[in-house]
């Protein structure tokens, strides 16, 4: 279990912040893993789009790890960083943290995964990423 008072670590960028709502939960009040995965995908795609400067599609999710449950009312934040850049793809490491008490800065890491995105053109064909410095 990872705890931190400041989840803005290294070069991670905050790409998404939202609240877990009742419609996102099961009858026991736990947030569905699929909802968390979709929030992570939204954040990762936004990050990959910044790198590719084009539309991107998700082609893989690797090493998804659910560390702790997310509950109704948790503030959910997704942080992204580049894991690897290929010719047409970018692998993005995404960490999901929650604040259960939004009156404090204490955050808890609940999930992490690596999502891979491919840059595509208007016809949905893979295209090379811009040259990275």
Image (tube, rainbow, N blue to C red):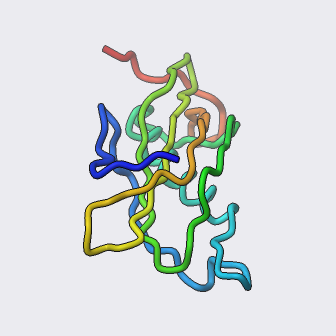
* Vertical arrangement, residue 33 with respect to residue 73, above or below: above
User: Quick one: quadrant of the C terminus?
Assistant: top left
Residue displayed at 57% across by 67% down: 70
Q: Position of residue 47 (x, y in %)?
A: 42, 42
Residue displayed at 51% across by 34% down: 92
For residue 127, which quarter of the picture? top right
Q: Nearer the viewer, residue 109 or 51?
A: 109
* Vertical arrangement, residue 92 with respect to residue 103, above or below: above
Q: Position of residue 116 (x, y in %)?
A: 61, 34
Q: Residue furthest right?
A: 27
Q: Nearer the viewer, residue 49 or 66?
A: 66
Q: Is residue 122 left or right of residue 26?
A: left
Residue displayed at 38% across by 52% down: 15
Q: Position of residue 122 (x, y in %)?
A: 57, 42
Q: Is residue 25 left or right of residue 86?
A: right
Q: Position of residue 132 (x, y in %)?
A: 36, 17
């Amino acid at each position: 279990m990872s705890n931190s008072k400041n989840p803005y670590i290294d070069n991670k960028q905050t790409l998404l912040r939202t609240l877990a709502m009742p419609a996102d939960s099961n009858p026991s009040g736990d947030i569905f893993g699929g909802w968390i995965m979709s929030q992570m995908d939204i954040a990762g795609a936004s990050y990959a789009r910044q790198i590719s400067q084009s539309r991107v599609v998700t082609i893989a999710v690797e090493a998804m790890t659910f560390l702790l449950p997310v509950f109704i009312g948790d503030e959910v934040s997704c942080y992204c960083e580049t894991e690897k850049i290929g010719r047409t793809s970018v692998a993005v490491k995404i960490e999901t943290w929650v604040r259960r008490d939004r009156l404090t800065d204490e955050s808890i890491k609940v999930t992490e995964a690596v999502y891979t995105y491919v840059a595509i053109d208007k016809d949905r064909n893979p295209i090379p990423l811009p040259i990275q410095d």
